[in-house]
Image: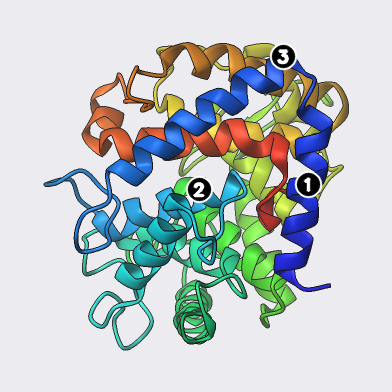
Amino acid sequence: MNRLAILAALVFSATALHAQDPQKQRVDAALKKASDFLVSQQQDTGAIAEKGVRPDVTMTSLAVLAMSSMGHQPADPTPEGRAMKKALEFVLKPGQQEPDGYYGKTDGSRMYGHGIISLMLAEMLGMGGDERQDAAIRDHSRKAIDLILRSQRLPKNEANRGGWRYTPDAADSDMSVTCWQVMALRAARNAGMDVPKESIDLAVRYIKSLYSGGERKGGPGGFGYASKGTEISTTAEGLLALQVCGDYDSEEVKGASERLLQKGLKQGDKWFFYTAYYMAQGMYQRGDKFATEGRRAIMDAVLPLQRADGSWEGEGGEERQGGKVYATSLAVLSLAVKNHFLPIYQR
């Protein structure tokens, strides 16, 4: 069964499962309004981003991921499908990707954007609007993934080896940039691309080096940004990244999920939407009480913040600068984990 057939089956089963659940219906209504908002933000170029807000290639990629997480496909004869196909053309057009495969230069997003765009392209493999677009997605995706792998192999000291930083030639690393590259590599590997196990193992090693176990073994712990720590945003990142690398039962995974279970997600948290995205996926992957409580925390914190036009907007300085497409896309991705439409969401 190909990726399109699997997605169609998931859409049907999820629709039937949630049809009688009022809470799910509330989320579905919010997602529909958000989808309408994202479509309304598409420019003549195909970019889905507010005018004047950059990085537009990265924002467009986040919007495509968000619409795909709701079950929309670029081949659909719908407003969402047409918007996604046009958005992909914008991302794939000549000049957006450097000859060496790098996507972070044109729109100024650096390796943050490169990881997000690479993740989107890997998730869209085999799901383009037509055969020509499918071929272009595969070509651009392969080059983007190769750039990530080459960047990781550059010589670094022991404290930074295995991770990524702002530029492909950086000699240091941090959790946030690393997690986007890991997500892209996992998505590419899921889609059948060659991603060496050594690369995944090195990334796991780096992520675990940022873990702080707290006061007692087996208790709540967390991850830092570029050194050991327990910040909520980076703890959510580390939890998801380890699990998508196949590490589901380590001390680090257990400790991070316990911390997120205790702390939850609260309006006003720094990097609120960013944290919501990683926490929603990470707790879902963890399963059991973590998935249940994580889903409740996300809904309670995110849903009340939706605006009348269907959008969300960051409240803190850094997130507000990202614009409404940024916040809305991450809000959708955090709420839509329940659908399991994106391959990266599947356990």
Amino acid type of the residue that numbered disc 3 sits on in the rendered structure: Pro
- Badge nearest the viewer, 1 or 2: 1
Identify the residue shown where x is 71% and y is 40%. Answer: 339
Which callout, 1 or 2, points at the residue further toward the start of the chain?
A: 1
Q: Is residue 244 above or below residue 265?
A: below
Number of marks in the rendered image: 3
Q: Position of residue 170 (x, y in %)?
A: 35, 67
Q: Secondary structure at mark 3?
A: helix
Which callout, 2 or 3, points at the residue further toward the start of the chain?
A: 3
Q: Report how far apart the C-alphas of labels 3 and 1 lie in the structure.
A: 18 Å
Q: Secondary structure at mark 1?
A: helix
Q: Report how far apart the C-alphas of labels 1 and 2 lie in the structure.
A: 17 Å
**Which residue, given by chain and number where applicable, does mark 1 sit on?**
12
Rendered image: mark on residue 22: 3
Q: Is residue 307 above or below residue 273?
A: above
Q: Report how far apart the C-alphas of labels 2 and 3 lie in the structure.
A: 22 Å
**Residue 223 in view, yes or no:** no
Relative to the observer, which residue lies in front, 322 or 79?
79
- Badge nearest the viewer, 2 or 3: 3
